[in-house]
């Protein structure tokens, strides 16, 4: 288990701290050492080639020791990116609070955008490696679905309303769509540096505000989103 809070340091810093943490078994410290060097390589070049020889030079470990932990560098990259996604999910900014709803959404999106910007190299690496590692996409979908379920519960608690199973599915589906839209926008903005997005929203505050305007109608009127098919059927 990781007992260093990632928000107290960078993701690479967390891995480095774990590799030196005497409360962690020596074998795990070695594993974190290898992962920290993979992470450093990704920070330097998200789509650059990583070889076993590079990691042996970076860690000072023997080839045999490396293969005790990973079959090859691809497995090491997968483990590293999966850990990144799971750590990111655990430490997502919390929604809401009792403040003005739009302000709460904006504050959450602003924190989210800033954290994404700080970790853009890992998201770029995820985009690059996911094309050949379908397990990463499965993991991301599972995490985003769990996040949508959690937000749906928070919405019902805030508004003190209860939806039936079908309505819950519609609301969660709408939230999952918003999550996919938001993460896709951030990838375009910070990883691919889409020129139109950057011209329209020149800084993270403007980008966060634009994202919040997409989230607010659903968060402010969840019953509308929860009766999605009713609106669809009424128009057809």
Image (spheres, rainbow, N blue to C red):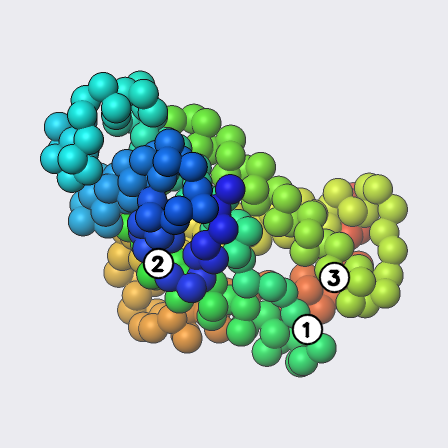
According to the image, label 2 marks what residue?
A: 10
N-term-proximal mark, 3 vs 1: 1
Looking at the rendered image, the disc whose residue lies closer to the viewer, 3 or 1, is 1
According to the image, label 1 marks what residue?
A: 97
Question: Which of the pair 187/55 is nearer the observer?
Answer: 55
N-term-proximal mark, 3 vs 2: 2
Q: Secondary structure at mark 1?
A: loop
Q: Is residue 98 above or below residue 234?
A: below
Q: Which mark is residue 155?
A: 3
Residue that appears at 39% across and 47% down: 22
N-term-proximal mark, 1 vs 2: 2
Looking at the rendered image, the disc whose residue lies closer to the viewer, 3 or 2, is 2
Q: Position of residue 192 (x, y in %)?
A: 28, 51
Mark 1–mark 2 distance (CA, rounded to whole Å): 26 Å
Q: Secondary structure at mark 3?
A: helix
Residue that appears at 32% across and 30% down: 76
Q: Position of residue 101 (x, y in %)?
A: 66, 75
In the drawing, does residue 111 fall left or right of residue 130? right
Looking at the rendered image, the disc whose residue lies closer to the viewer, 1 or 2, is 2
In the drawing, does residue 171 fall left or right of residue 133? right
Question: Which of the pair 197/157 is nearer the observer?
Answer: 157
Mark 3–mark 2 distance (CA, rounded to whole Å): 31 Å
Residue that appears at 31% across and 72% down: 202
Outermost residue on the bottom side: it is 100
Mark 3–mark 1 distance (CA, rounded to whole Å): 11 Å
Q: Is residue 179 above or below residue 200?
A: above
């Amino acid at each position: 288990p990781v007992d260093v809070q990632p928000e107290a340091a960078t993701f690479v810093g967390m891995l480095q701290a774990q590799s030196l943490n005497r409360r962690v078994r020596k074998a795990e410290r070695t594993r974190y050492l290898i992962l920290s060097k993979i992470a450093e390589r990704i920070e330097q070049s998200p789509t650059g080639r990583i070889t076993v020889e590079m990691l042996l030079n970076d860690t000072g470990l023997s080839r045999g020791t490396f293969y005790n932990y990973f079959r090859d560098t691809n497995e090491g990259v997968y483990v590293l990116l999966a850990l990144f996604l799971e750590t990111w999910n655990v430490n997502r900014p919390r929604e809401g609070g009792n403040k003005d709803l739009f302000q709460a959404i904006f504050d959450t999106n602003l924190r989210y955008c800033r954290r994404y910007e700080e970790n853009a190299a890992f998201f770029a690496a995820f985009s690059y490696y996911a094309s050949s590692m379908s397990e990463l996409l499965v993991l991301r979908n599972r995490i985003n679905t769990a996040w949508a379920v959690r937000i749906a519960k928070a919405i019902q608690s805030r508004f003190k309303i209860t939806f039936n199973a079908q309505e819950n599915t519609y609301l969660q589906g709408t939230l999952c769509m918003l999550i996919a839209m938001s993460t896709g926008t951030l990838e375009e903005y910070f990883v691919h540096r889409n020129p139109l997005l950057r011209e329209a929203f020149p800084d993270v505050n403007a980008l966060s505000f634009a994202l919040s305007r997409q989230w607010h109608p659903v968060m402010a009127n969840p019953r509308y989103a929860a009766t999605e098919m009713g609106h669809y059927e009424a128009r057809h």
